[in-house]
Every structure is written in structure tokens, then in C-alpha cells.
Amino acid sequence: MERITLSTGQKALKINLNENLYGTFAEIGAGQEVVRHFFRAGGASGTVAKAMSAYDKDFSDAIYGREEDGRYVTEARLRKMITHEYNLIEERLDRSRFPDKCYFAYADTVATINFTKKFKGHGWMGLRFQLSPDQEPNDVIFHIRMKEEEAYLQQETIGTMGVNLIYGCFYIRNRPEELLRSLYDNIAKYKVEIDMIHFEGPEFKNVDNRLMSLQLIKNGMTDAVIFGPEGKNILPAALLYKKNILTLRGSFRPATKVNIDMIKKAYGYFVEERKVDHDNLVVLFEITLNNLRAEGEIDEQDFLDRAEILCSLGQTVLISNHQQYYKLVEYFTRYTDQRMGLIMGVTNLKELFAEKYYRDLKGGILEAFGILYSSDLKLYVYPSQPEEGDEIETSKSVKIHPRLRPLFDYLLNNRRMIDIENYDPEILQIFSRDVLSQIRSGDEDWDKALPAYVDTIIRDKRLFGYDPEKSKTRKGGGKLEGSNA
């Protein structure tokens, strides 16, 4: 059944009229707007235990403590706020007087657009809440990037989104994906971007936060999300700010020896660059949303299988909606002006110089390359040899349309495009699509194409459709149903 969307005032009133909900509001920086909706709706005395705004930094520090980095609009600050305020509720309210109350603490810390309008503003919002009086609390926290051009408009959006968060946690919490979508109730998506979200607590014990990240992109709430080796969502700005970035795009279905060789060899080239700081470097494995949709609708289990392998290899994963490389680089330049590197095979290099991908740009391919190389960027090209005995194709031998040859040669001659020459020639015929087919058909030879231990993970967790019964049939010499064996 389709959910009926209530107005912001209706949501606030419904919460106020729920006699079992009781909590506090703490809003610092440019927030200030969320609790106003509850006061305006009426009946707030039964819901709002306290509302405060520690707008002055010294007062804020006295309440929540100083941050080591001196910043106030951070995840660490938000977590201190909801922890401090929630603990105060439990300390100051006698449970014998409120046996049926479910406590909550809402908090936000926000900086809106500045006077020059160069800094658009961002913030953190979160809620710690109970769903029964004897339950341990749950947390939902997320980061927003604001896009409106006036501070008062941004404040109104924050107020609406805060009400949506509180309402969603109490009334839609058993459907996390729907809860996520409800954050934009009565808000146009162009006004604000959510680029990181995290669910935790007993109510969300079965929620995979990597899937919630994927939902952010699927729902058009952001264009890119990042999660680390342990599977935890990472705020892009926190990871990428003023960093050297080296990125490999692929399907990783599964990650093969070729993928690992590409990243290792390109990394060796990249760290030798004079403008690259080894201690200030981020390596990303990128999967595009378009790639995840290659076979139609996104298969969430297929996505998790890929993520499981990459995380087990200790890699940081970027999921993006940037099909064209120039858009990916443009995204990175939000956060850094340091040297970046893109790793690609010869096939992707050919696509990079295919004009059909740039028809939506007024300046066509030249505009795209202007964006690419307005940043400090290097391309690292891995060779191609589809069949043993074929000529090995590199950037120096690839066929490019004569009209684009001068641009191509300029990049090559100025070392903005570099061939990876110390590659492993024994693995050039490995392709993820072939390995995936072998895994699903029960062909035992697929493990030779994968990095150490990856085959064990696939077998133990039965990833990518691996079926041990099919493998037994293969070993026993029987014929598989639907096979040409």
C-alpha cells in the first residue's frame, strides 16, 4: 500500500498527541528550526521535555566538551550531543513517574550558506530513541549538503527534515528503506543532499548500512557514497578532503587477479609522482550505479557479494552515479585540489575518447576533457590482450579517431596518460564475466583467476550464485542440467 504523506505540521501534531513519546531537542549552529514545528502544532508540553540552542561556542563547549579539531559541525559533535541529552533524560526523569514513556533525543549541528555564497552549507542530524520503555535506544544519524541560495530557505528545509526524521523513526522504523525516502517528504531533492547515513540499535540489527548507502543513490538523494573495509559508511568529505586520490573503476563481479594487479602497479607509479604524498593518499574501488543495473534492476544481493569481496581485501568502496569519468573527477574536486589518478584498461580508454558519450555537453568531448584536466590528473592505462597470441594493446597502439588524435597525443606526450608496463602477462586473459559464469556453472577452474583467499570467501559464503552441489556434479563427471558439458 502506498504511504500517505502528511504535512510537516500534521507529523509534528501526531507526535505531540502520542502520550508515550517524550524527549529533548538540541540544535546548534544554524539549526534552530525543528522544535519550532512541534511548538506550533500544539500539545507540545506532553512531548518536549527540553529545547535548547547552544549557539555560542563557549556555551556549547561547556555542555558537550571541546572537539580536538576545534570544529563544531561534525559527526563526533552530533554523537556527543545525542549521548549527552539522552543520558540527561534518563538521569533526571524518574521511571516510576513515566513508566510508559519512550524517551528520545534529537540533535543537529548545522552551518548554512555564507555571505559570499561560495560555501553552501552542511550539517549533521540525528535521533536517539526508544520504541518501548525497557528497550535499549536506537540511533539514526546522517549528513546533509545544502544547495539552496538563501540561509532562511536552508533553515526551513532543516526544520522539515528534522520532523521527518523523528516521525519516520517512530512510525516507519520497521521499513528502513521507506523511512529513508520519507526524509524528503515535503522537500524537493534539489534543495538538500544526504550523502551519508547510519542506522544502529536493536530495531536495526538486521539493517546493512551498505544497502542504505545504495538506497541514497538509487533514490537520487546523492551521487556517490563510500564505505570502508569494515563495511561502515564514510562521509566523503571526511575521507577525501585535500587528499591524493587513486581510483579503479570496475564491475568486481568478482574482483580478479587483474583488478589487483591494476591497482598495485598503478599505485607504484602514482606514489613515485612528485606531487603525491604517500601518507595523504586514498585508494578507491569504484562501482557505478549503471554497472549495478547492467542486467536490469539492481540486485541487492549481487551488490553485497561484490562489497563483501572488496571489503575482505581491505579496500574502500565508492558507489557512484557518475557514468562519465569527467563527472567523477568533477565530484572529487569538491573535496581536493591534489593530484588524482584514474586507472583504466584499454577498452575504457577507447570509450573515454568516444564522442557519443559527450553529446549532452555544448562543448562536446573538448568540454569533458577540459573538466578532466582542469584538475591535476594522471591516467594509468593497463594493457589488453583478449586472446593469447593477440597483439598486446597499449595506449601507444590503440586506434583513435583522427580528429581526436592531436588531443590524445598531447596527453600521451605530456605524460598525463601513462602505460602500466610492469604488468603480469600471465593474467591478461582473465575477465570477471567469464569467472562469474564459471562460478555459477560449477566449473572448479575459476579459483585460479582470483586473488588469494577470495575463492574461499566465495565458497564459504556462497557468493555470486556459487552452489557446491554443482561443483560436486562437475567433479563426479556427471552432466549438468542445461550444460553443454
Image: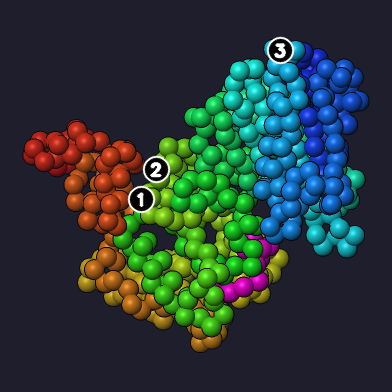
Q: Which amino acid lies under the numbered mark 1 shown in the image of this protein?
A: Pro
Circle on res. 254: 1
Farthest bottom residue? 413
Does residue 314 appear left or right of residue 123 in this picture? left
The residue to which callout 3 is attached is 96
Question: Residue 356 is drawn in which quadrant?
Answer: bottom right
**Image coordinates for residue 52, horizontal then vertical, percent:** 85, 36
Q: Is mark 1 on a helix, strand or loop?
A: loop
Q: Which amino acid lies under the numbered mark 3 shown in the image of this protein?
A: Ser
Mark 3 or 1: in front is: 3
Q: Do the residues labelled 2 and 3 touch (CB within 8 Å)?
A: no
Does residue 313 appear left or right of residue 279 in this picture? left
**Crowd class of label 2 (few under 14; some 14 to 19; many from 20; radius 10 Å):** many
The residue at the point 57 percent across, 34 percent down is 200
Question: Residue 104 is drawn in which quadrant?
Answer: top right
Of the numbered discs 2 and 3, the one sitting upstream in the chain is 3
Which quarter of the figure is the C terminus placed in? top left
Q: What element carries label 3?
A: loop
Q: Are marks 1 and 2 in contact (CB under 8 Å)?
A: yes
Q: Which amino acid lies under the numbered mark 2 shown in the image of this protein?
A: Asp
Q: Is residue 288 above or below residue 42?
A: below
The residue at the point 88 percent across, 31 percent down is 36
Q: Main secondary structure of the magenta part?
A: loop
Circle on res. 305: 2
- Magenta region: 331-341
